[in-house]
Image: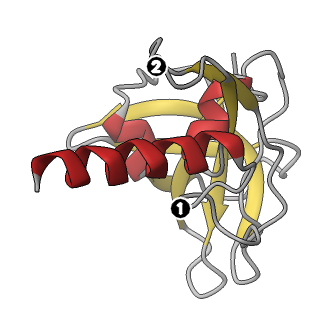
Amino acid sequence: KMMKLILILLSAMLCMSSTSVNAFAPSFPTAPVRSATLQFTTPSTPISTTATSTTLFGKKAARALGNARKGKSERVKKVKDDVIEVEATVIESLPNAMFRCTIDGAPETQEPVLATISGKIRKFFVKILVGDKVTIELSPYDLTRGRITFRKR
């Protein structure tokens, strides 16, 4: 019995190493993804010493190719339909992460906007000081309040 089991296992390993079909790879990718190919060698066995290639998809392929956005200086973000984005300057820092900002290019008679920090800026501890140039999203319903979404360098 034991000899039959070993014989079956060895023949299965021989079949898998001799065919180019990968049982664990998806038959078609779900999204157009650049794939990276890595070479893996099987441990030396008396049966065969061939190399098999594995195609990576999704997160592993992205890690294998590196972060494509790392060297870019432009910011990529989702487009929102119902907000008004304006450039502003911080003129006063208030408690609870609130800031009073003046909109760049607005007349002097326009009152300043009361803006709070967005979640990403709060998450990554971006420091905003008086005099900083920021990007503010204004709601079309109340143009006196806004959300700071980006701090210019």
**Residue found 61% across the figure and 39% down from its top:** 17
Residue 143 image position (x, y, % from top left): 62, 73
10 Å crowding of disc 2: few (<14), some (14-19), many (20+): some
Quadrant showing the N terminus: bottom left
Is the residue 24 above or below the residue 50 in the image?
Answer: below
Q: Quadrant of residue 51?
A: top right
Q: Amino acid at mark 1?
A: Gly
Is the residue 64 above or below the residue 22 in the image?
Answer: above
Q: Return the residue found at the far left.
A: 1
Q: Tell me if I can see residue 98 in this picture.
A: yes
**Residue found 46% across the figure and 19% down from its top:** 129
Quadrant showing the C terminus: top right
Q: What numbered label is drawn on residue 129?
A: 2
Residue 81 image position (x, y, % from top left): 76, 81
Q: What numbered label is drawn on residue 146?
A: 1
Q: Quadrant of residue 127?
A: top left
Q: Amino acid at mark 2?
A: Leu
Residue 150 image position (x, y, % from top left): 62, 38
Label 2 residue SS:
loop
**Residue found 44% across the figure and 32% down from its top:** 92
Is the residue 90 above or below the residue 112 in the image?
Answer: above
